[in-house]
Image (cartoon, helix red, strand yellow):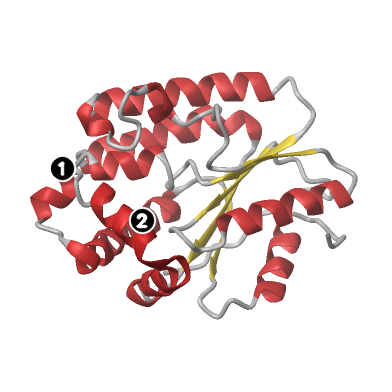
Amino acid sequence: MAIPANPGCSETPTHRLVIIEGIMGSGKSTTMRFIAQSLQVSGQLALPIHERTEPHPVRATDELKHWFEPWRDATPQDLADRALTRWAAFVKAIQTETPIAVMDGQLFHGDLTHLLLMDAEPALISDYVSAWTAIIAPLNPFVLYLWQQDVEKAIRTVFTERGPDWIDYQVNWKLGGPYCVRKGYRGVEGLISLYRDYRQMTDDLFDQLPLAKLAIENSRRDWPAYESQILNSLQLRGRA
C-alpha cells in the first residue's frame, strides 16, 4: 500500500480534527494521547476523545438497544444515516469551540466497522465515506492510519497481549454479524479472515480520502520514529 504524506500545512496547524485509525491493538489510543499532549505542548488546546467516551459525540450505535449488535435494531442505511447526522451535529458544535478534537477511531473503527458486520453493500459504504468527508471538511481534518502488512501476525499479537477472555468476546461478538455468517467465518481463524477483509476495505477507502493524511506501517513498533513522522506532518516541533 502506498503511504501518502500530508499534502501540506501552514506553519500553525489548522486542523480542527485529528482522527487516528487502525485495527484493534494498533496503537490508536496511545497515539491519540501523544498527539493531544503534543498539541498542548505547542500551546494549543486539545480535546482527546477515546473510543470508550460516554456519551460519545459521534458513535451512532449508542442510540440503539443492542449497540454491539446493531443488525438487530437497524438496517445498514439507517445506521449510516444516524452516523452522518451525529457527525454533522459534532462539526457544528466544535466549530464554535477552541480545542482541537483528537479522536480515537470513529471513521473506520466504529460505525463503519458495524456497517461491514451488517453486510452493507460496498456502494453504501463508499457513499457513506464520501458524505462523511463532505460533512467534516469545514474542520480541515487530518487522518492518521496505522496499519500492519501482516494482518494475521498483528491479530495474533493482540490475542497474546489481551488473553483468552478477550479473544472469546471478539469472536462471539463480531462473528455473529450477518457478514461473517454469510462468509462462514468461525473461531480465531474466522476473526483473522474478517480483519483481512476489513484491512482491504480500509486501505481502499483511505487511499481515496481527499484529506490531509498519513499512513504508517507500524509492525516494528518503532514509536519514536513514528512519533517524529506524526509531529512533522502536523507541523508540531515540540515533543510531549
In which quarter of the view is residue 14 placed?
top right
Task: Name the side, left or right, on which 46 lies relative to 41.
Answer: left
Q: Earlier in the sequence, mark 1 or mark 2?
A: 1
Q: Which mark is residue 178?
A: 1
Task: Name the side, left or right, on which 111 lies relative to 232.
Answer: left
Where in the figure is residue 88, as x and y percent of width and height? 52, 22
- Kindly identify the residue that appears in the image at 27 percent across and 66 percent down: 192
Closer mark to the observer between disc 1 and disc 2: 1
Amino acid identity at mark 2: Asp
Q: Which residue is mark 2?
A: 204
- Kindly identify the residue that appears in the image at 21 percent across and 29 percent down: 72
204 vs 88: above or below: below
Where in the figure is residue 216, as x and y percent of width and height? 55, 67
Q: Which is nearer the eye, 84 or 205?
A: 84
SS assignment at label 2: helix
Q: Which is nearer the eye, 136 or 36?
A: 36
Quarter holding the C terminus is: bottom right
Classed neighbour count for the residue bearing mark 2: other residues with Cα under 10 Å, few (<14), some (14–19), many (≥20): few
In which quarter of the view is residue 168 placed?
bottom left
SS assignment at label 1: helix
